[in-house]
Image: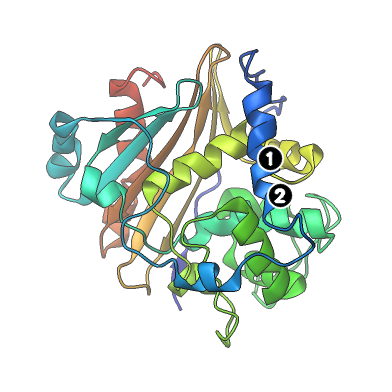
Amino acid sequence: MRTETGSRGPTLVRRPVRGARGGLAAAGALTVMAGLACSADGNEPNEMENSADVSQMGRGDVPTEERDDLEAVFDEAGVEGTFVLHDVYSGTSTVVGADMARERVVPGPTFELANSLVALETGAVADVDEEIEHDGSGGAVSLREALPDSDVDVQRELTDRVGADALHTWVDRFDYGNRAVDEQNEDEYDWLEGPLEISAMEQTVFLAGLARGELPVAAEHQEALQEVVLREQGEEHDLYATEGWSAEADPSPGWWIGWVDNGEGLHTFALRLEADEDTQMQQREPLGRDLLDRLGVLPA
């Protein structure tokens, strides 16, 4: 399988995520409680629901504004794509390419965010600095080193350590995409070829939980992951992002996802391209930055 990995961003001085707006803690607590409720009776999450929820129209729907005028950004680049910008505080989204934004496809290497949280929470890896031996040719690397490059071999190793049953449970608790972890898949890498799928709308909702530290895992694990995916710091904003492309999947989506925190505002985003060439996929971040600039979230 040929799976593209992301490029490492510039070396940065790490700092904690900017504080979220006050007055929303209660809603966050409800989110965490909802994530834990699926196992509150001591039973595992509903396997039938996990396996059967495979509709093409993704959940994660929120009040949206469709910006058809911005589809020209993709047209001029000669690619087919979609972009979702989610205002975490208002709970609304701006969508470019609405139909495609709700279509579920494989998350590919962007699943590393959920997978790494599961590995940390279950103790499959001690922390983001533990060196991880894997079957790839790169030798032992830590999550701190692997995540900026979307190292698929490291994520495969973590998946093996966690095991299909536990991964199934946590994908269910995260309400991640269609939650379809196929325990009969011999390779157990459902995030690369399916059946696990997620829409761009759902990506931004999942990212909102991570950006605010409200997913149903330990706060320190979310904070550690936030620090690792911090890509850029400006005087008035922090940019957190990761990318990935599952070239052998059909369709073969390329993602650039993350969030922008400027203290007063917090926006998650998900850009997805459908393209067959490396040169086209290299446009993910530039196109995403262009759209973030046009929408007034990240200065060019």
Residue at 71% from the left image edge and 67% from the top image edge: 44
Residue at 65% from the left image edge and 13% from the top image edge: 22
* In the displayed structure image, the side of residue 235 where residue 289 appears, left or right: left
* In the displayed structure image, the side of residue 41 where residue 155 appears, left or right: left
Q: Which residue is mark 1?
A: 32
Q: Nearer the viewer, residue 274 or 3?
A: 274
Q: Which residue is mark 2?
A: 36
Look at the numbered disc 2 and give the secondary structure of its residue. Answer: helix
What colour scheme does the image use?
rainbow
User: Which amino acid type is marked by label 2?
Assistant: Leu
Mark 2 vs 1: CB contact within 8 A: yes
Look at the numbered disc 1 and give the secondary structure of its residue. Answer: helix
The image quadrant where one finds the C terminus is top left
Q: Nearer the viewer, residue 46 or 145?
A: 46
Q: CA distance from mark 2 to mark 1?
A: 6 Å
Residue at 37% from the left image edge and 72% from the top image edge: 249
Res 134 seen here:
no
Q: Badge 2: how crowded within 10 Å, few (<14), some, or many (20+)?
A: some
Q: Nearer the viewer, residue 212 or 161?
A: 212
Which of the 4 image quarters holds residue 253? bottom left
Identify whether 77 is placed above or below 25.
below
Q: Badge 1: how crowded within 10 Å, few (<14), some, or many (20+)?
A: some
Residue 285: x and y, percent?
38, 41
* In the displayed structure image, the side of residue 38 where residue 68 appears, left or right: left
Residue 109: x and y, percent?
51, 60
Q: Nearer the viewer, residue 176 or 192?
A: 176
Residue 217: x and y, percent?
75, 46
Residue at 69% from the left image edge and 50% from the top image edge: 37
